[in-house]
Image (cartoon, helix red, strand yellow):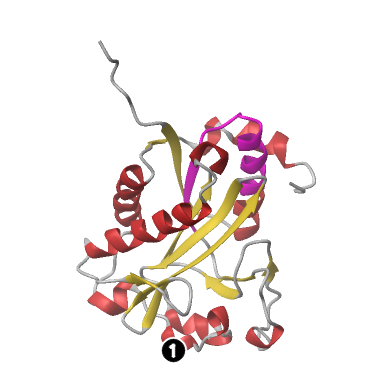
């Protein structure tokens, strides 16, 4: 008799609101752990205090007016804002175990957001000329990924109840701040980040054919700290 085949198991962590630098350090530690086979594929859900980050394609003219220093990071893309009311999903995946198919990985990330937004009666699509996820002519989510030896990190930022005025201090992804939108703006209703995150994870279970089981940070914290080192990965 042929045995039943089960989906692979991954981990999901909902960390609530944490500083960007701390989350970045944890990601880098988890990248090392994933590379060494000490963890499963992980999705981290977080919310950040206000911060501006600049990716590999960042152009100075897009964040020239900032009064605070941005965080320069290794993800793709230009400049963006993170802050309260925005849900960020980080993906620490080993693509060597997923056919080294980066295009499919990126498509799944975006499709998961689009399918979740559909549950809130919002029709969204992937951008053609510009990256991210769009509702009509307005951008509701930004995506930026880094890959090191086929281990991914960074991810997607989804504007749920975000104060969109915060984007006015930059040209997000090189575009006018007026193009940004949120679930709150589209529906007139505030959204629970936790509930949206639960729906998002269910969609990722299906899209990645993986059961992402909830795991608490303290179960991994000591191992992550031991992997951090100089943060060089």
Q: Residue at x 51, y 41 (%)?
A: 99
Give how far across and how far down residue 101 sits, in percent: 51, 49
217 up-or-down from 61: above or below? above
Magenta segment includes 30:
yes
Q: Residue at x 35, y 53 (%)?
A: 197
Give how far across and how far down residue 92 sits, in percent: 55, 45
Depth check: give the residue in front, 151 or 158: 151
Q: Which residue is mark 1?
A: 178
Q: Quadrant of residue 151?
A: top right
Q: Quadrant of residue 20?
A: bottom right
- The single residue placed furthest to the top in the displayed view is 1
Q: Quadrant of residue 74?
A: bottom right
Mark 1 residue crowding within 10 angstroms, few (<14) / some (14–19) / many (20+)? some
Is 8 on the left or on the right of 28, as rendered?
left
Image: magenta residue range:
26-47
Is 44 on the left or on the right of 8, as rendered?
right
- The single residue placed furthest to the right in the displayed view is 230
Is 197 on the left or on the right of 84, as rendered?
left
94 up-or-down from 138: above or below? above
């Amino acid at each position: 008799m042929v045995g039943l085949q089960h989906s692979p198991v991954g981990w999901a962590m909902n960390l609530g609101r944490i500083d960007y630098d701390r989350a970045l350090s944890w990601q880098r530690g988890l990248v090392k752990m994933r590379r060494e086979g000490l963890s499963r594929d992980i999705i981290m859900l977080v919310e950040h205090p206000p911060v501006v980050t600049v990716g590999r394609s960042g152009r100075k003219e897009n964040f020239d007016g900032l009064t605070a220093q941005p965080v320069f990071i290794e993800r793709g893309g230009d400049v963006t804002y993170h802050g309260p009311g925005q849900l960020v999903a980080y993906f620490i995946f080993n693509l060597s175990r997923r056919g080294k198919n980066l295009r499919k990985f990126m498509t799944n990330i975006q499709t998961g957001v689009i399918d979740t937004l559909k549950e809130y009666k919002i029709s969204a699509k992937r951008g053609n000329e510009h990256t991210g996820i769009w509702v009509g002519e307005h951008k509701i989510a930004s995506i930026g990924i880094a890959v090191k030896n086929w281990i991914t990190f960074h991810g997607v930022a989804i504007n749920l109840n975000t104060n969109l005025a915060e984007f006015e201090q930059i040209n997000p992804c090189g575009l006018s701040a007026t193009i940004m939108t949120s679930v709150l703006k589209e529906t007139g209703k505030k959204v629970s980040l936790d509930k949206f995150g639960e729906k998002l994870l269910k969609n990722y279970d299906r899209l990645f054919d993986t059961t992402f089981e909830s795991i608490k940070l303290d179960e991994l914290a000591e191992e992550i700290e031991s992997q951090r080192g100089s943060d060089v990965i």
